[in-house]
Image: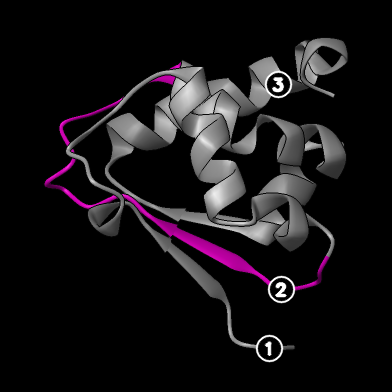
């Protein structure tokens, strides 16, 4: 298996990440759709300098990836998050929501 791809929020112009549209734009810029098609692991780093990450942003960036993975476990096998507990909780609730709203996100 190849080296993991790193998505580092410190390099994405924070410290505030909000809005589904912004998440969807970054999804395209970071080629997340293409990453979903590979076996490559993705490490997502959200540094302590990040002030806020909204659920709409996470759903825009990763919602389709969650739906494609099909389960929380399969999503987290591919996408590994390094962040503080607050952001991990936000991400986890977004993963649950994406699976519940998969018709909307697909």
Q: How is the image coloured?
A: one colour
* Residue plotted at (55% across, 72% down): 5
The residue that disc 1 covers is 2
The residue that disc 2 covers is 40
Q: Is residue 40 above or below residue 77?
A: below
**Magenta stretch in the rendered image:** 38-55
Q: Is residue 53 magenta?
A: yes
The residue that disc 3 covers is 98
Question: Which one is earlier in the sequence, the residue at label 1 or at label 2?
Answer: 1
Q: Is residue 57 magenta?
A: no
Query: Which quarter shows the C terminus?
Result: top right
Left or right, residue 90 beside residue 51: right
Q: Is residue 41 above or below residue 104?
A: below
Question: Which one is earlier in the sequence, the residue at label 2 or at label 3?
Answer: 2
Q: Nearer the viewer, residue 87 or 53?
A: 53
The picture places residue 64, in percent across and down from the top left corner, at 74, 33
The picture places residue 84, in percent across and down from the top left corner, at 27, 43
Q: Are marks 1 and 2 in contact (CB under 8 Å)?
A: yes
Q: Nearer the viewer, residue 7 or 28?
A: 28
Magenta-colored segment: predominant secondary structure: loop
Left or right, residue 102 beside residue 54: right
The picture places residue 94, in percent across and down from the top left corner, at 57, 23
* Residue plotted at (77% across, 22% down): 99
Q: Is residue 85 above or below residue 45?
A: above
Quarter holding residue 103:
top right
Question: Which one is earlier in the sequence, the residue at label 1 or at label 3?
Answer: 1
* Residue plotted at (79% across, 49% down): 74
């Amino acid at each position: 298996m190849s080296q993991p791809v790193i998505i580092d929020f410190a390099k994405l112009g924070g410290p505030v990440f909000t809005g589904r549209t912004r998440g969807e734009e970054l999804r395209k810029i970071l080629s997340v759709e293409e990453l979903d098609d590979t076996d490559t692991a993705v490490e997502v780093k959200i540094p302590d300098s990040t002030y806020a990450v909204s659920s709409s942003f996470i759903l825009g960036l990763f919602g389709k990836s969650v739906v494609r993975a099909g389960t929380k476990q399969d999503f987290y096998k591919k996408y590994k998050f390094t962040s503080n507990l607050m952001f991990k909780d936000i991400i986890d609730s977004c993963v649950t929501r994406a699976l519940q709203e998969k018709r909307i996100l697909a």
